[in-house]
Amino acid sequence: MSLINDALKQARKAPPRSAPSALPPLQPTADEDSPVAAWLLSAIVILLIVAAIFFIGWAVAHHTVRTIVATPDPAATPPVVGITLPAVTPHPVEPPPPLNPPSAPKLQGIFYSPTGSSAIVDGKTVRTGDQFHEFRVKSISKFTVTLVGPDKKEIKIGMGN
């Protein structure tokens, strides 16, 4: 509080600031533009706009003509020779085993790592080799978990179903 009081006392003792200058303030000049200058400026702006439109149109037309000239003549191209391919009969392919059979547990998430992945199956976290109900976890990939049932049958389960 005493610092504030000391500052106020010093401010009262300080000499007054200098008075403003005795010169009158500057007055704006009278701007008397001639009507010719205004019309001349307008005409120049309009002329520049018209010139820009002309040159843009010329560039577009020139580009179009160059493109049309550059297309090849259809009569000068060699005729297309038909090629027949031998008939290929597809080999019968077995459909892949169904992903997420109805009796399979539900996969809820995969935490993939090349060194040690884990997955959440029916709310339980499992790793490769773990026993889960009657299944054993054989492998965990980025998108699927392979389970082996008690009958040694593999079941792949994935996200979403």
Image (cartoon, rainbow, N blue to C red):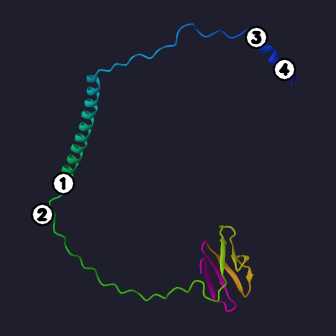
Q: Earlier in the sequence, mark 4 or mark 2?
A: 4
Q: Position of residue 152 (x, y in %)?
A: 66, 90
Front in this rendered view, residue 14 or 142: 14
Q: Which residue is mark 4?
A: 5
Q: Which residue is at the far bottom?
A: 151
Q: CA distance from mark 4 to mark 2?
A: 103 Å
Residue 124 part of the magenta segment: no
Q: Residue at x 23, y 44 (%)?
A: 57
Q: Which residue is mark 1?
A: 68
The amino acid sitting under disc 4 is: Asn
The amino acid sitting under disc 2 is: Ala
The answer to whether the residue labelled 4 contacts the one labelled 3, judged by CB atoms less than 8 Å apart, is no
Q: Which residue is mark 3?
A: 14
Q: Depth-wise, is mark 4 or mark 2 nearer the camera? A: 4
Q: Earlier in the sequence, mark 2 or mark 3?
A: 3
Q: CA distance from mark 3 to mark 1?
A: 87 Å
Front in this rendered view, residue 31 or 150: 31
Q: CA distance from mark 4 to mark 1?
A: 89 Å
Number of marks in picture: 4
